Amino acid sequence: MASAVPSDDDVLRAVERRLAERGAPVDLRAPGAAKVSWQSLFEFRVDRSIEKRHERATRQKGTSEDIEARPTYTDLDAYPVAPPDDPARTYRHRLVREGTVDEVPCDGCVGGRTTCGTCKGRGGMPCPPDVECEDCHGGVDACWECDGTGTPRTRRARAGSRPRGPDAPERAVCRRCGRRDVACPTCRGRTRKVCTDCDGTASTPCKECRGAKRVTHRPCGGAGRFTVWTEGVVAHLPDPDEVRLSGPQFAWLQTDLLGVWMRAELTGVTDALPDFLEDGHRDLIARHLPARENEVRRRMTFAYLPLARVEVHGHPDRVYYAFPAVTGIEVARRPSRRRVTALAWAATAVAALVVAVSLAVLR
Ligand SMILES: [Zn+2]
Ligand SMILES: [Zn+2]
Ligand SMILES: [Zn+2]
Ligand SMILES: [Zn+2]
Ligand SMILES: [Zn+2]
């Protein structure tokens, strides 16, 4: 019983049982007592595999050993390739046209290496050999006697001397004028100090080539040559279509969970369609049945769940839905549209009342 399409009578008997459980025995099969309409659920999917063949000039870095190992062809259209196992997946067969494999030298490098672009082949980057003293900033504090010039101010007719507080740091002997206790302790009157980045050599090693002046040539991967060939590709590309007559409006019925669906899978375009299809379903999928151009494989899946909608004359506020389940015919109940509309009006009336009361309270 579970896997056959129930009749109107089967459905009505199931609804009768449901009503009887709630203490309302009734004969729904009497004329005019109930109305059955079928809204069966139907899902169809076709996965086609379309074959496409094309040729293209190809090249890769390095030598040709792995390319030589690939299957070859002379006439791509005549090369036999088996249809794919799974038409829902993409497959690409990469072939090599006979006699087209060649190795060519890279014209952008010598032996896979090229002049470093960062240092322009110098191996290093220019760097100032010395920098300004960070303590005296090369100013008059370099030396209170000679300002870092080597000529004491007393001979340059500059009056006054620097005030010196008790907390002032020790002064050093000036390397320029030779006076004691007057020079900046960091640069000792020289105003500048040796650059720690280059140790005074005026050049730092290039970060790109680390001083080697040459780097690996990226386009050829350091191989210094390319392999070129004509590639033939036989691609099997999925081309699916779907038809579904099982909208979300029936999600509450839990038909995926409870329903005993009838299912079928076909792989041939000329296969007879499953017996359970209704005429409407056949019309819906008709345009998906003929083979497409270059179609090499297909899989069609069909799923069908008979679903009856039952209106009972004696209960106009409700609608019943029935479908085959493992335990027999499952019956579910919903408020009818008439009932839903009435409830909606009632809810609106309550809301209006709440607003009126709120306003009265706030006043
Ligand atoms: Zn190169
Ligand atoms: Zn430097
Ligand atoms: Zn000095
Ligand atoms: Zn200094
Ligand atoms: Zn470099």
Image (tube, rainbow, N blue to C red):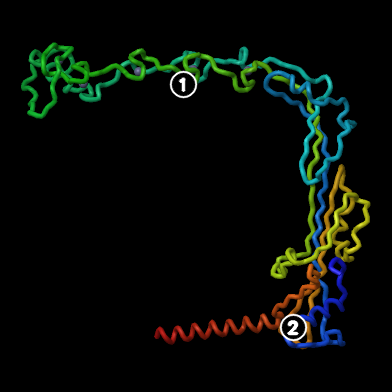
Q: In the picture shown, does residue 49 fall above or below 204?
A: below
Q: In the picture shown, does residue 26 fall above or below 331?
A: below
Q: Residues within 10 Å of mark 2 (few under 14, many from 20)?
A: few
| Rendering coords of residue 38 (x, y %) | 83, 73
Indicate yes or no: mark 1 CB to ligand 5 under 8 Å: yes
| Rendering coords of residue 211 (x, y %) | 47, 15
Quarter of the view holding residue 15: bottom right
Task: Describe the element under mark 1 as helix, strand or loop.
Answer: loop
Q: Is residue 328 left or right of residue 215?
A: right
User: Of the residues under marks 1 and 2, which one precedes in the sequence?
Assistant: 2
Q: Residues within 10 Å of mark 1 (few under 14, many from 20)?
A: few
Q: CA distance from mark 1 to mark 2?
A: 86 Å
Locate the N terminus by quadrant: bottom right
* Mark 2, residue position: 21
* Mark 1, residue position: 207
| Three-letter amino acid code at the position of disc 2 | Glu
Q: Residue at x 76, y 65 (%)?
A: 246
Quarter of the view holding residue 329: bottom right
| Three-letter amino acid code at the position of disc 1 | Lys
| Rendering coords of residue 27 (x, y %) | 83, 87
Q: In the picture shown, does residue 53 fall above or below 127?
A: below
* Residue sitting at the far left: 160
Locate the C terminus by quadrant: bottom left
Quarter of the view holding residue 101: top right
Front residue of 327/286: it is 327
| Rendering coords of residue 108 (x, y %) | 62, 17
Task: Describe the element under mark 2 as helix, strand or loop.
Answer: helix
Q: Residue at x 14, y 15 (%)?
A: 173
